[in-house]
């Protein structure tokens, strides 16, 4: 898949249709542009705790691990000179809905804290997560997987509402001792997300 890939995201502060780019995320960039930038100076108080689920994520470490696996991709969405969102995904997961099918599995997906209405008083960008998921559905389609995407979501109203708004369906299956719900996007809803 070629990078960078242009995409449109909604900019809440200035204008609609802000240009962004999906780029490969390498360990050094993850360390400098996410680990050292995203949560620096953002208080993680009790009120923000449900919205700072990823404040401890080591994107550099995750990208180092990803670099060793040819079936894993790490990408970020950049706009306004900063990383606005990031995602790591597997290219060879099994669909929960149709076990005989392979799908793309989202391992990690996050928007920068300054883009979260629950964290920032005036979010900079809206649509980073959606743009990254649309990228994953396109990659799924290019691999012949019909746009199928699977995610094990954290159990917050915000995250579950986000995936529901994009057409992800609860499969009834869960992951791990935290029982994170597996949500899957059908080929039909993937086309809606991609705008085709």
Image (cartoon, rainbow, N blue to C red):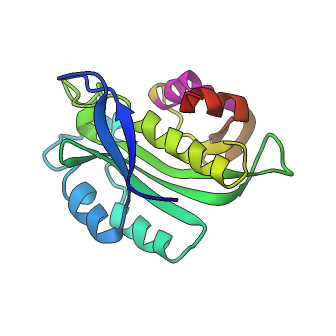
Left or right: where does residue 188 sit relative to residue 106? right
The residue lying at 50 percent from left, 44 percent from top is: 135
Q: Is residue 154 in view from this perspective? A: yes
Residue 136 percent coordinates (x, y): 55, 47
Q: Does the magenta segment cover residue 47? A: no
Residue in the picture at 29% in, 25% down:
117
Name the residue at the bottom extreme: 68
Q: Is residue 141 left or right of residue 118?
A: right
Task: Classify residue 52 as left or right of residue 80.
Answer: right
The image shows residue 120 at horizontal and vertical percentages of 21, 29
Nearest to the observer: residue 73 or residue 51: 73
Picture quadrant where residue 187 is located: top right
- The image position of residue 75, as x and y in percent, is 42, 55
Q: Is residue 46 visible?
A: no
Q: Decide: is 79 above or below 70.
A: above
Magenta span includes 165 = yes
Query: Which residue is pictured at 37% across the width and 33% down the height?
Result: 8
Q: Position of residue 138 (x, y in %)?
A: 58, 45
Quadrant of the image for the C terminus? top right
Residue 162 in the image: above or below residue 33: above
Tag count: 0
Q: Is residue 15 left or right of residue 126?
A: left
**Outermost residue toward the left?**
41
**Magenta residue span:** 159-170
Vertical relation: 3 (above or below) 53: below
Q: Residue at x 30, y 62 (%)?
A: 30
């Amino acid at each position: 898949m070629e990078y960078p890939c242009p995409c449109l995201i909604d900019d809440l502060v200035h204008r609609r249709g802000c240009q962004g780019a999906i780029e490969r995320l390498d360990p050094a960039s993850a360390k400098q542009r996410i680990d050292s930038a995203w949560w620096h100076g953002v208080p993680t108080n009790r009120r923000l705790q449900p919205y700072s689920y990823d404040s401890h994520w080591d994107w550099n470490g995750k990208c180092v691990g990803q670099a060793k696996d040819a079936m894993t991709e790490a990408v970020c969405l950049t706009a306004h000179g900063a990383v606005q969102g990031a995602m790591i995904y597997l290219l060879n997961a099994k669909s929960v809905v149709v076990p005989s099918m392979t799908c793309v599995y989202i391992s990690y997906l996050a928007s920068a804290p300054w883009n979260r209405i629950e964290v920032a008083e005036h979010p900079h960008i809206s649509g980073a997560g959606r743009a990254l998921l649309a990228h994953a559905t396109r990659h799924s389609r290019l691999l012949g997987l019909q746009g199928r995407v699977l995610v094990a979501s954290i159990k917050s109203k915000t995250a579950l509402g986000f995936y529901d708004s994009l057409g992800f369906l609860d499969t009834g299956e869960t992951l791990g001792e935290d029982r994170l719900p597996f949500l899957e996007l059908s080929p039909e809803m993937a086309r809606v997300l991609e705008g085709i």
